[in-house]
Amino acid sequence: MLRRSLPWLVLLASAVLEAVWATALGLSDGFSRPVPTLVFAVTATLSMLGLGWAIRTIPLGSAYAVWVGIGAALTVGWAMATGVEPFSVLKVVFIAGIVGCAAGLKALPAERDQPAAEPAHR
C-alpha cells in the first residue's frame, strides 16, 4: 500500500513546495532580496525533483495537473490568509474545485502498467 501511495505523497509534498517557491518568488523582489531568493531556489529545485520522481510512476498529465493545481490553490490560499490578496468567497469555491479535481485524479482506478511508447526514429 505504501509503495503505491509514496509517489502520490512525494507529489503532494512537491506541490506544497511549489506554493512555497511561488510565494518566495513574490517576496524576492526580482531576486534582489537574498533570503526569499534562496528559499525560492532551494524549494523550486526540491519541488521539481519530487515532480520528476513522481512521474516515474504517475502519468505525466495527471501528475502535472495535481502538482500545479494544488500548488496554485495553496499559493492563493496563503496570499488570502496573509492579506496579500483580497479574500473572496467565489475564489474559495473555485480553489476548492481545483483541489477536488486533483483529488479526483488520485481517486481514479490505477491503470494497468503499459510499456512506454518507443520514440519514432527516422
Image (tube, rainbow, N blue to C red):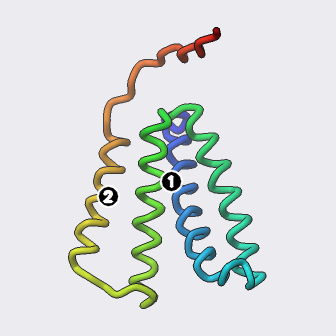
Q: Residue at x 53, y 15 (%)?
A: 117
How many numbered markers are drawn?
2
| Local crowd size for mark 2, using a 10 Å CA cut-off: few (<14), some (14–19), many (≥20) | some
Q: Is residue 110 depicted above or below 64 in this figure?
A: above
Give the vertical position of 54 relative to 56 (above or below): below
Residue position marked by numbered label 1 in the rendering: 12
112 lies left or right of 54: left
Give percent across and percent down for residue 33: 74, 85
- The structure residue drawn at horizontal position 30% and vertical position 51%, both measured from the top left corner, is 101
Residue placed furthest toward the front: 122
Residue neighbourhood size for the residue with mark 1, other residues' Cα within 10 Å, grouped as few (<14), some (14–19), many (≥20): many
Looking at the rendered structure, the secondary structure element under dot 2 is helix
**Is residue 53 left or right of 86 when viewed as pictured?**
right
Q: Amino acid at mark 2?
A: Ile
Q: Looking at the picture, which amino acid does disc 1 mark?
A: Leu
Query: Which one is earlier in the sequence, the residue at label 1 or at label 2?
Result: 1
Image spot of residue 46 (x, y percent) = 68, 56
* Quadrant where the image shows the C terminus: top right
Residue 73 x, y percent position in the rendering: 40, 66
Residue 83 point in image, percent of width and height? 42, 90
Element type at marker 1? helix
Q: Residue at x 46, y 55 (%)?
A: 68
Q: Give the Cα distance between marks 1 and 2.
A: 14 Å
Judging depth in this view, the residue of 30 and 70 nearest the camera is 30
Q: Which mark is residue 61?
A: none
Residue 87, by quadrant, is: bottom left
Residue 54 falls in which quadrant of the image? top right
Which residue is labeled 2 in the image? Answer: 98
Q: Nearer the viewer, mark 1 or mark 2?
A: 2
Is residue 119 left or right of 103 when viewed as pictured? right
